Amino acid sequence: MTIKDLPASMRPREKLLARGAAALGDAELLALLLRTGLKGTGVLQFAERLLAEFGGISRLLNASVDDLKRVKGMGPAKRAELAAVLELARRSMARELQQRALFDTPERVKDYLRLALAQRTHEVFAVLFLDAQNQLLTMEEMFRGTLTQTSVYPREVVKRALALNAAAVVFAHNHPSGVAEPSRSDEFLTQSLKSALALVDIRVLDHLVVGQSEVVSFAERGLL
């Protein structure tokens, strides 16, 4: 069955306009982005197949370009549209975080970091620099590593924090394995950075480890 075969009230575009985006399921929203299916496969069926293949909308939107290239029917235009949606979501969340104290909305911070880091195939160490009111000044990806480790230099973090006149920081890094559980080396690194920043009176508020579907907070675990 194609979208044209559906009653007008059940077609994704008409349904969205009449009832709002929240009324649509993941496959319907994705179908609106994809616009066309494949020969013999309607766009709704194509959307459902993609969601099943990637294990849900979050994993699909966070899929790499190479992952999407391997899917029949995912040409450059479709890949670009999915990437654009993800980037818009990142920017929207970043601006929202800049307008209030960071930990007024801890779950939004975790959602933002999942969008920013969960899909990376190599380890990335990022620092969220905060002002005296704990509002986000900027987030910067300071170090990148292999699939298993990242070299992080406390001196560079201190230098950048001073340049931005930051009063506090939050660290974040991803685990490409998808498992967010902090390692012993993560704990050691956090304490080393905390000691270095304490010398210049900059507080470390948290260190967040980003997995595929979970973000673990050092502060919540009592590891700071």
Image: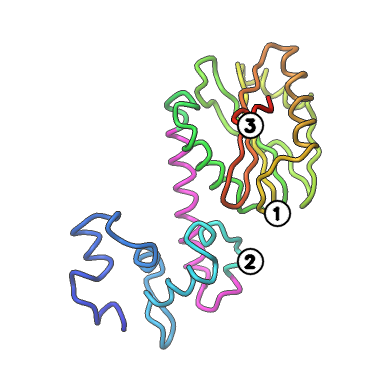
Q: Say which label, 2 or 1, has the lower sequence index.
A: 2
Q: Residue at x 51, y 65 (%)?
A: 79
Marks 1,3: beta carbons within 8 A:
no
Q: Which mark is residue 221?
A: 3
Mark 2 and mark 1: span between their CA atoms?
A: 17 Å
Q: Image height check: is 106 above or below 52?
A: above
Name the image quarter holding residue 141: top right
Q: Residue at x 31, y 81 (%)?
A: 2
Residue type, numbered disc 1: Ser
Asked if residue 124 lies in the magenta stretch, the reply is no
Residue type, numbered disc 3: Arg
Q: Image height check: is 28 above or below 6?
A: above
Q: Say which label, 3 or 2, has the lower sequence index.
A: 2
Q: Which residues are magenta?
A: 69-96
Q: Between residue 190 and residue 115, name the one nearer to us.
A: 190
**Percent position of residue 52, x then y:** 50, 70
Which residue in the protein does label 2 denote? 66
Which residue in the protein does label 1 denote? 177
Mark 1 and mark 3: span between their CA atoms?
A: 21 Å
Q: Is residue 139 left or right of residue 143?
A: left
Name the image quarter holding residue 191: top right
